[in-house]
């Protein structure tokens, strides 16, 4: 293509993006990703490599300070998609200012074979004591050809441990072409957020009670897209899509955050919005209200977000509708929800994935300011912005 034609093509592309509702191109900014949020731009870490923490979660967390004590910093955990669709290691980054992110490496690594466990000291240290069947199970669950998605981490103050829960999936004999047929929640633990995390197992979670209508009775207790939420009283919850992605569930975790607290409906878990087909859930608390944001189910393509809110996790949830305002609102500014968190000044921030299904490692991050207006979570587009100067009405 000649330079002239390339220029025309670039204008047409920009115009199309603008018309389809997103002011989603970052144009002629003096700023860089290290001094402002530039939604949709390539975001590099302190080594200059594009950040690989997709489907992730950002939170302020207690971490080792490197000299035997602890400190607090922001931790960003997510999928390292340099391996493509399958076998994504779970990567961790840290930052004090939310602009500069230091890569702490892959903290949960997929395992290619039993012989890798036997020969690589990294894996031998984690799984060497298991018997052959157990080692094979680790490979079957977190092999380099398995789905390892939407990892989330929690620090357990009571025992000093860190847990990662993630969407663990694979094909099955009855559905050999669909890598999301197993539908389970994977668990890994470590005594450091920087790993190494040891894969424990994967599980089906709570099931639809027999006196309610199960939207997918053929496969009980499924768990796919998920998130974790730590309440102010130290209780942790896992929120996930179940019943073939038709119904969201929130289940309370046990004291160690390594399993469910129980199976009593309304006390240990709740089913939400049966048949609504929501995924990519994010649960937060602002003052005394809980907000649950989610996307619809269209794979890597963006769709319209929705928020429900409630005074109690196991209470009645109110449909607050689409939280996004302005151009691009019908497709969540071309993103899918993955995290909501607060900057040091209290400013809430929405973090979404702008997936690139063709080159997953080039999927981008879109962080936008969140306000709470008349009790409703609201997200507006910004071409570039700073949390220090954001409008943090909340
Ligand atoms: C999305 C989901 C992603 C990934 C993708 C695969 O709906 O949120 O985590 O699983 O589908 O198509």
Image: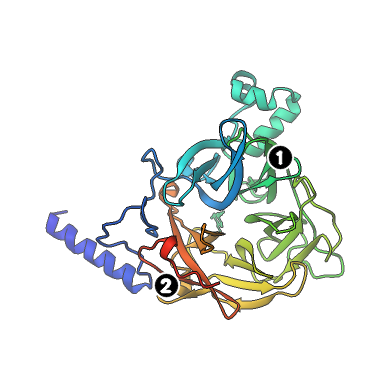
> Which of the pair 290/109 is nearer the observer?
290
Graded by Cα atoms within 10 Å as few (under 14), some (14 to 19) or many (20 or more), the crowding at tag 1 reads few
The percent coordinates of residue 248 (x first, y second) are 69, 64
Tag of residue 160: 1
Q: Quadrant of the C terminus?
A: bottom right
Q: Secondary structure at mark 1?
A: loop
Q: Is residue 144 visible?
A: no
Task: First in sequence, mark 2 or 1: give its number.
Answer: 1
Report the image quarter containing ligand 1.
bottom right
As displayed, is residue 112 above or below residue 287?
above
Q: Give the residue displayed 65% in from the left and 22% down from the top.
A: 124
User: CB atoms at circles 2 and 1 under 8 Å apart?
Assistant: no
As displayed, is residue 338 above or below residue 255?
below
> Which of the pair 1/24 is nearer the observer?
24
Residue 300 shown left or right of residue 375 in the figure? left
Q: Give the residue displayed 65% in from the left and 62% down from the top.
A: 245
The percent coordinates of residue 76 (x first, y second) are 53, 48
Q: Residue furthest bottom?
A: 374
The percent coordinates of residue 5 (x first, y second) are 15, 60
Q: Secondary structure at mark 2?
A: loop
The percent coordinates of residue 20 (x first, y second) are 37, 72
Tag of residue 327: none
Dot 2 corresponds to which residue? 328
> Which of the two marks, 2 or 1, is nearer to us in this view?
1
Residue 202 shown left or right of residue 371 in the figure? right
Residue 190 shown left or right of residue 30 in the figure? right
């Amino acid at each position: 293509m000649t330079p002239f034609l390339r220029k025309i093509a670039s204008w047409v592309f920009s115009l199309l993006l603008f018309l389809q509702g997103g002011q989603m191109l970052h144009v002629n900014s003096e700023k860089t990703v290290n001094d402002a949020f530039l939604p949709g731009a390539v975001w590099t870490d302190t080594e200059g490599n594009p950040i690989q923490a997709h489907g992730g979660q950002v939170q302020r967390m207690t971490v080792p300070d490197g000299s035997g004590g602890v400190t607090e910093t922001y931790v960003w955990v997510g999928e390292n998609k340099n391996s493509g669709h399958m076998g994504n290691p779970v990567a961790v980054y840290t930052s004090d200012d939310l602009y500069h992110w230091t890569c702490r490496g892959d903290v949960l690594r997929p395992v290619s074979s039993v012989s890798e466990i036997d020969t690589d000291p990294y894996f031998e240290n984690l799984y060497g004591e298991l018997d052959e069947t157990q080692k094979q199970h680790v490979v079957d669950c977190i092999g380099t050809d398995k789905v390892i998605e939407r990892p989330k981490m929690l620090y357990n103050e009571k025992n000093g441990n860190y847990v990662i829960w993630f969407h663990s999936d694979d094909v099955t004999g009855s559905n050999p072409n669909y890598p999301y047929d197993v539908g389970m929640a994977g668990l890994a633990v470590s005594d450091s957020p920087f790993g190494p995390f040891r894969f424990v197992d994967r599980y089906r979670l709570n099931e639809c009670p027999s006196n309610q209508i199960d939207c997918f009775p053929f496969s009980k207790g499924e768990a796919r897209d998920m998130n974790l939420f730590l309440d102010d009283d130290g209780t942790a919850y896992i929120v996930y899509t179940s019943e073939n992605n038709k119904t969201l569930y929130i289940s309370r975790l046990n004291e160690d955050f390594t399993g469910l607290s129980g199976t009593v409906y309304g006390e240990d878990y709740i089913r939400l919005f049966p048949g609504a087909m929501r995924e990519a859930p994010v649960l937060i608390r602002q003052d005394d209200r809980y907000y649950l944001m989610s996307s619809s189910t269209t794979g890597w393509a963006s769709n319209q977000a929705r928020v429900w809110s409630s005074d109690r996790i196991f209470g009645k949830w109110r449909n607050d509708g689409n939280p996004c305002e302005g151009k691009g609102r019908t497709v969540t500014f071309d993103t899918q929800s993955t995290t909501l968190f607060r900057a040091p000044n209290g400013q809430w921030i929405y973090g979404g994935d702008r997936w690139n299904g063709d080159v997953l490692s080039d999927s981008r991050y879109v962080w936008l300011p969140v306000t709470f207006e008349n009790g409703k979570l609201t997200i507006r587009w910004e071409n570039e912005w700073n949390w220090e100067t954001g409008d943090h009405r909340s």
